Amino acid sequence: MGLEISISDCSKSDFEGIFPLLQQLWPAKPLDPETLRALFSGAIDSNSRVLLCARLDGRVVGFGSITLKTHLWHGGLIAWVDELVVDTECRKRGIGQRLLERLASLARERGCRAMELDSAFHRVEAHAFYEKLGFEKRAFLFAKTFVD
């Protein structure tokens, strides 16, 4: 019997299932659930964000999100992948690919010319995953954190 995976828009009530996935995505980062809940709620209400959940028999096992933004270099809208994570127990089953393909489809429907993302140097398996799906390495990401 195959997996009963469904991909759908997230709702605010999905945060409870998504928070543990974010902890898996960023294991070394202390996460404040109430701050993230407020940010998640704002993203759900935003016209420039798309948030999708993957469910296995009704349980949230994957999460992906994009932000649509105007990009001068690309000459129009692009979709920036903010998060993509699948529960460690459910990886290697095509769930991440289905999430990313659905995000790409929605981005194209909204007129995006490209999809971009960043991925930490140590995430070698993720890099192979993205390359398998047609993404190419073309830049380094430089970041500067502003501390309150």
Image (cartoon, grey):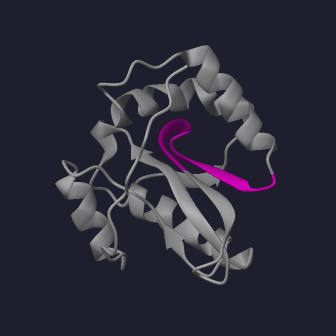
- Label count reads 0
User: In the image, which residues are magenta?
Assistant: 47-64
Q: Main secondary structure of the magenta part?
A: strand
Q: Residue 119's spot in the image, x, y percent?
A: 33, 54
**Front-most of residues 58 and 73:** 73
Q: Residue 126's spot in the image, x, y percent?
A: 27, 57
Q: Residue 116's spot in the image, x, y percent?
A: 48, 67
Left or right: residue 102 compared with residue 76: left
Q: Is residue 15 above or below residue 127?
A: above
Left or right: residue 85 compared with residue 111: left
Left or right: residue 127 compared with residue 76: left
Question: What residue is at 37 percent from the left and 75 percent from the top?
Answer: 135
Q: Is residue 24 above or below residue 96?
A: above
Question: What residue is at 73 percent from the left and 32 percent from the top?
Answer: 41
Left or right: residue 44 compared with residue 124: right
Q: Is residue 38 above or below residue 74?
A: above
Name which quarter of the figure residue 107 lies in. bottom right
Question: What residue is at 41 percent from the left and 56 percent from the top?
Answer: 95
The magenta stretch spans residue 100 = no
**Front-most of residues 24 and 98:** 24
